[in-house]
Image: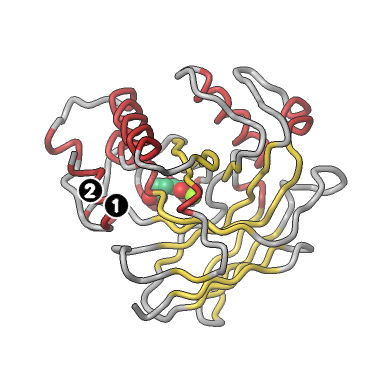
Amino acid sequence: MELAQSQRRGSIARRLSEEWPQATAEDAYQIQDWLRLSALAGGERQSGWKMGLTSEAKRQAVHVHEPIFGWLGYSMELTDGILPWRGVIHPRVEPEIAMILGHDLHGPDLRPRDVWRAIEAVVPAMEVIDSRYEGFQFSLADVIADNASAVYYTLGPDQFSTANRLWGNVGISVYKNGTLAQTGSGAAVLGHPVNAVIRLADMLAARGLELEAGMVILTGGITDAVPVGRGDHITVQFEGMGSLGLQVLDN
Ligand code: OOG
Ligand code: MG
């Protein structure tokens, strides 16, 4: 299918809603799952799941008004803070709080303490999104089928304990080439990033999917995403937790 090819090559795909106007979110999750399973059959390994559109800033930017999820693969993790330009279309970077699962977690209807018991560590992260649709324009079903625009993510080298930190209050600043581009705080994510995990566990449970020990969960962009081009440099400061950098290559 066209989206599969576009995701592999970094090329524009026709919108699902143009070809199939009646497609529902549920149809789109089936397409996403089919694409996930075919990537896994092709040798990709799943590293985790991502939530998207958990903040109002993000929902307003893309005019899609409910949270969505997607899957993450090991090949999507940038381990050296470098984003290759080849293979991306119109990338954007967003600051996120990632959680690493020490135990399996089964929804639905979890409480924050159920989540914290399963989380081994919290890690400052960045996600690079790159919609396969022209102009980053899509409907709810379009973006779900396109794996919530996932392309790359990067995790900071330091892990933080879940306890003794007000995750909803963590201040975040995003700098592009040294200039402040966005600010936000952890509360932007559904009131508190733990709520993104509760919501993800609900959404996965409804579809027979699992949160497994060792997986990474991206809880969703805290601020609007920052578009990047060749040669740009992004720094994200996580209050009290250091900073993360991403260099976009020229080619
Ligand atoms: C959809 C993906 C949103 C987030 O963190 O909110 C997302 C998009 O904006 O293209 O990853
Ligand atoms: Mg994101």
> Where residue 158 appears, x then y in whole percent?
74, 60
Residue at image point 45% right, 69% down: 83
For the residue labelled by badge 2, is the local secondary structure a helix, a strand or a loop?
Answer: helix
Q: Horizontal placement of 63 versus 127: left or right?
A: left
> Is residue 200 shown above or below 149?
above
Quick check: can you spot residue 60? no
Q: Amino acid at mark 2?
A: Gln
Q: Residue at point 24% right, 51% down?
A: 6
Q: On the picture, is 34 further left or further right than 94? A: left
* Residue 241 lies in quadrant: bottom right
Q: Which residue is mark 1?
A: 8
Residue 183 at what x, y percent from top left?
A: 60, 64
Q: CA distance from mark 1 to mark 2?
A: 5 Å
**Distance from mark 2 CB to nearest ligand 1 atom below 8 Å:** no
Q: Amino acid at mark 1?
A: Arg
Tag 1–tag 2 contact (CB < 8 Å): yes
Looking at the image, which is closer to me, 173 or 16?
16
Q: Position of residue 153 (x, y in %)?
A: 51, 56
In this orientation, does residue 132 appear? Answer: yes
Q: Residue at x 37, y 41 (%)?
A: 147
Mark seen at residue 5? 2
Residue at the spot 66% in from the left edge and 33% down from the top edge: 213
The image position of residue 27, as x and y in percent, is 28, 24
- Give the structural element (helix, strand or loop) at label 1: helix
User: Does 172 sit left or right of 233 as displayed?
Assistant: right
The scheme the figure's colours follow is: secondary structure
Relative to 94, residue 146 above or below: above
